[in-house]
């Protein structure tokens, strides 16, 4: 019996999200009195794989198969299923991001395993196995009981944090049985973004909406993000109108994020947007409409014109950082 955590890398490097998953799974394994096994797909150096040991993974399996370098739902599910069977895993943990949404339901069906998506805490009980998650677009919590022998949990971002629990990780190559017929997705081209903070892992996010009045006014948003070392984001109408790329759209139909600080400039605060940012630890809103719904969820609010507030805020932050 073991706990298996599936962790992803970017260009051979693990980042905060991966270490948070290992930390979370390690806590579960410790509570259950069993071992933790991490699984990674793709070309990752051994010294990078061994970093999972700092957060509690006693064994790290790596599948170095070039065919798995791009997400293929069917193939990745089959690989994870075989790892679960080899390690006799009774709990599988993965992120609630794009990959988790694609893989976890398929894995659940193949393993006949109960599943909790977007979990926000470690199980409150292991008999029965009970996990808390957000529901109703983040307005409420639900305690879900899983009665199957194998359970799958996808963890909400920034829900648990990164916690060291150092052990010596045994890095092993894992060779699953997959054939070319298992690969059903063909990737013809891909674009890689570099030099920017990844939105889903950012501690600070600077976001804006239609209150910016046009894409030509986005300079201060990017400047503030640069000063703070933050990621940039936007509301859906902004992405739909082509002011900003859809990769920056946060909300119920976009990316769901949970930064430590979320700035909302000129965003009204429709329920669909709030659903994607409600897990933020601190929300700071700036809007000229004092009745804007965003103020009902904001921890701090400024009623004012974003075009006037932004330059003053940027200057003040620069002065504080210069001290």
Image: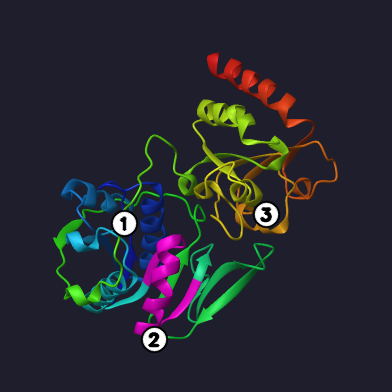
* Between discs 3 and 2, the one toward the N terminus: 2
Q: Position of residue 58 (x, y in %)?
A: 24, 60
Query: In this orientation, does residue 56 appear?
Result: yes
Q: Is residue 18 left or right of residue 141?
A: left
Mark 3 or 2, closer to the camera: 3
User: What residue is pinned by disc 1?
Assistant: 56
Q: Position of residue 134 (x, y in %)?
A: 60, 66
Q: Quadrant of residue 87?
A: bottom left
**Residue 113 belongs to the span the image colors magenta:** yes
Of 70 and 53, the residue lying toward us: 70
Q: Position of residue 126 (x, y in %)?
A: 46, 76
User: What residue is pinned by disc 2?
Assistant: 112
Q: Residues within 10 Å of mark 3 (few under 14, many from 20)?
A: many
* Between discs 3 and 1, the one toward the N terminus: 1
Q: Is residue 233 left or right of residue 13?
A: right
Q: Position of residue 65 (x, y in %)?
A: 17, 62
In the rendered structure, which segment of residues is drawn in magenta?
92-116
**Residue 20 belongs to the span the image colors magenta:** no
Above or below residue 280? Residue 113 is below
User: What residue is pinned by disc 3?
Assistant: 274
């Amino acid at each position: 019996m073991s706990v298996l955590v599936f962790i992803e890398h970017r260009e051979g490097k693990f980042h905060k999200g991966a270490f948070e998953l290992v930390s979370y799974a390690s806590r579960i394994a410790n509570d259950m009195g069993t071992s933790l096994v991490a699984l990674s797909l793709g070309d990752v150096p051994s010294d990078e794989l061994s970093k999972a040991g700092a957060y509690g993974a006693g064994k790290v399996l790596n599948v170095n198969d070039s065919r798995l370098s791009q997400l293929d739902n069917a193939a990745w599910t089959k690989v994870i299923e075989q790892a679960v069977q080899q390690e006799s895993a009774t709990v599988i943990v993965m992120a609630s991001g794009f990959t988790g949404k694609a893989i976890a339901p398929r894995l659940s069906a193949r393993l006949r395993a109960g599943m909790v998506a977007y979990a926000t805490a470690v199980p409150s009980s292991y008999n029965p196995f009970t996990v808390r998650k957000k529901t109703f677009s983040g307005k409420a919590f639900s305690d879900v009981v899983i009665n199957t022998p194998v359970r799958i949990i996808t963890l909400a971002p920034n829900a648990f944090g990164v916690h060291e629990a150092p052990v010596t990780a045994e890095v092993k190559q894992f060779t699953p049985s997959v054939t070319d017929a298992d690969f059903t997705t063909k990737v013809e081209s891909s674009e890689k973004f570099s030099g920017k903070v990844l939105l889903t892992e950012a501690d600070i996010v600077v976001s804006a909406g239609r209150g910016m009045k046009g894409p030509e006014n986005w300079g201060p948003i990017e400047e503030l993000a640069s000063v703070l070392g933050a990621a940039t984001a936007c509301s859906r109408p902004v992405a739909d109108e082509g002011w900003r790329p859809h990769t920056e759209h946060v909300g119920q139909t976009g990316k769901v994020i949970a930064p430590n600080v979320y700035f909302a400039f000129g965003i009204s605060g429709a329920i669909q947007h709030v659903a994607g940012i409600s897990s933020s630890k601190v929300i700071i809103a700036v809007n000229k409409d004092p009745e804007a719904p965003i103020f009902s969820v904001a921890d701090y609010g400024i009623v004012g014109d974003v075009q006037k507030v932004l330059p003053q805020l940027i200057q003040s932050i620069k002065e504080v950082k210069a001290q």
